[in-house]
Image (cartoon, helix red, strand yellow):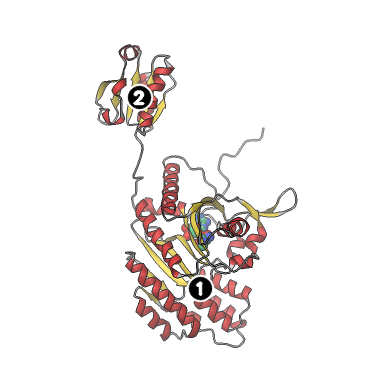
């Protein structure tokens, strides 16, 4: 037998408690919060046709995809995100439903990027997609949902960065820049390589002066009115200025929603090429990374061959949110009481009765498989249990259990009839 390598494949991770428990709690809390806004769960395939992403995901995502041929020769990939799959599902199954169609998902995604802190090749996204509504109300709802979720989980230090793809796209279209060059330039701007983007655009701008692209990032404003003024000052006009006004409106509402650390940046672009309008990202100050992002993509459904359908959505990087919380000294807020039940007699029905009572009260009850008190107690304290419950012959005879509080060291004999989590010593 060749020796098996025990390290996971580069960029992949094994997750064990407490991290695995914390991440699952973050996922569950997202599901509850998204449901509370009327989003409904969908479960999408991990493997999709490569074509789905090739159409409009943008150069960065496409370059970092796991693409391969399946046994029937189909060119497939591991999904690098879920929006394209959600759009496919909308077209195939959900488009006949009354509008709006609001869905949420939590799933693993794969990107072949250079691994580093907060950047993995397999990670978890939790997101929502809102189909069939063009008004800013839908975009604003996304911000309220993000606000509530981050409050639910207790992330304290974050900033919301807002932008609008309509501004850049309008300028690039007015200079007749071909779409693939636009996507490449937007990718460069997203990476912070504005000078490279300007050089590229200059070659394809039919003689137009593209220097305004360098000016846009100067307009970073928390104040909605100053944002519009700054846009005018750097030379934004016409339809592009209308988009600045729309962005300014969303910025103002975000403040009214109680999101204090929020600003708009006219030079902000997101790498995914399907965005057409309002975009945003959540920046964790503790981590120095974006922990989530999204925006409006009003043309993706029609690019897939469907009817013109406005859409907006976002996805959070659950692993990055977890890292950011840890940086802030976070601890999981709810944890079930953990009980180790140590039976010293072979009375399965009695043990089951006790375990069931405590489980009904919400406890985690783990039955120790050996009739050994000291080994059981060592196991319990090494695994962070709160109580040990011992069942010996005397306890069975008297209809009781012996309960040890492993934190306070208090001990009591409790009758099984009155056994409840609240009544433990
Ligand atoms: P995205 O910005 O590419 O957007 O990814 C969303 C989040 O996934 C990022 O903000 C980040 O937290 C996390 N993320 C990205 N790459 C990695 C990585 N290598 N390791 C760990 N976390 C990572 C989207 O995927 C869009 N589908 C969002 C969307 C939904 N837009 C509209 N609807």
Q: Is residue 35 left or right of residue 85?
A: left
Front position in the image: 163 or 185:
163
Q: Which numbered circle lies on residue 377?
A: 2
* Distance of label 1 from label 2 (alpha carbons): 60 Å
| Mark 2 crowdedness (10 Å alpha carbons): few <14, some 14-19, many ≥20 | many
Contact? badges 1 and 2 (CB < 8 Å): no
Quadrant housing residue 396: top left
Is the CB–ligand 1 distance for label 1 below 8 Å?
Answer: no
In the rendered view, tell whether residue 249 sits above or below residue 100: below
- Where residue 287 appears, as percent x and y from the top left, is 40, 58
Q: Which numbered circle lies on residue 107?
A: none
* Quarter of the image with the N terminus in it: top right
Residue underneath mark 1: 165
| Residue ID at (63%, 65%) | 306
Is the CB–ligand 1 distance for label 2 below 8 Å?
Answer: no
- Where residue 217 appears, as percent x and y from the top left, is 44, 76
- Where residue 263 appears, as percent x and y from the top left, is 38, 70
Front position in the image: 364 or 242:
242
- Where residue 418 appears, as percent x and y from the top left, is 28, 23
**Which residue reaches farthest front?**
98
| Local secondary structure at mark 2 | helix
Decide if residue 402 is in sight here: no
Q: Is residue 193 left or right of residue 150?
A: right
Give the foreground label among 1 and 2: 1
Q: Earlier in the sequence, mark 1 or mark 2?
A: 1
| Local secondary structure at mark 1 | helix
């Amino acid at each position: 037998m060749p020796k098996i390598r025990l390290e996971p494949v580069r960029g992949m991770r094994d997750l064990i408690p407490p991290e695995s428990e914390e991440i699952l709690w973050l996922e569950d809390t997202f599901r509850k919060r998204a449901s509370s806004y009327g989003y409904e769960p969908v479960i999408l395939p991990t493997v999709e046709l490569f074509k789905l992403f090739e159409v409009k995901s943008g150069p960065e995502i496409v370059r970092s995809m796991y693409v391969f041929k399946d046994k029937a020769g189909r060119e497939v990939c591991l999904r690098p995100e879920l929006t394209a799959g959600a759009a496919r599902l909308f077209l195939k199954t959900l488009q006949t439903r009354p509008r709006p169609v609001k869905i949420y998902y939590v799933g693993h995604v794969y990107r072949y990027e250079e691994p580093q802190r907060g950047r993995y090749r397999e990670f978890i996204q939790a997101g929502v997609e809102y189909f069939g509504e063009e008004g800013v109300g839908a975009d604003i709802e996304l911000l309220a949902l993000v606000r509530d979720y981050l409050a639910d989980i207790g992330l304290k230090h974050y900033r919301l960065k807002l932008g609008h793809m309509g501004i850049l796209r309008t300028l690039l279209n007015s200079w007749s820049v071909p779409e693939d060059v636009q996507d490449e330039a937007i990718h460069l701007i997203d990476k912070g390589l504005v000078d490279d983007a300007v050089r590229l655009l200059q070659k394809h701008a039919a003689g137009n002066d593209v220097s305004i692209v360098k000016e846009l990032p100067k307009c970073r404003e928390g104040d909605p009115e100053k944002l519009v003024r700054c846009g005018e000052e750097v030379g934004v006009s016409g339809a592009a200025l209308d988009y600045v006004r729309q962005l300014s409106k969303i910025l103002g509402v975000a403040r009214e929603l109680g999101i204090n650390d929020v600003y708009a940046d006219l030079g902000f672009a997101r790498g995914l090429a399907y965005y057409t309008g309002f975009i945003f990202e959540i920046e964790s100050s503790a981590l120095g990374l974006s922990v989530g992002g999204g925006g409006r993509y009003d043309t993706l459904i029609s690019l897939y061959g469907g009817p013109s359908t406005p859409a907006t959505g976002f996805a959070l990087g659950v692993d990055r949110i977890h890292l950011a919380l840890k940086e802030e000294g976070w601890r999981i807020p709810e944890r079930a009481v953990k009980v180790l039940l140590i039976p010293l007699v072979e009375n399965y029905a009695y043990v089951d009765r006790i375990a069931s009572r405590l489980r009904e009260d919400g406890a985690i009850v783990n039955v120790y498989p050996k009739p050994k008190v000291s080994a059981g107690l060592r196991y319990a304290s090494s695994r962070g249990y709160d109580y040990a419950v011992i069942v010996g012959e005397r306890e069975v005879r008297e209809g009781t259990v012996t309960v040890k509080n492993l934190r306070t060291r208090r001990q009591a004999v409790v009758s099984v009839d009155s056994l409840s989590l609240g009544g433990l010593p």
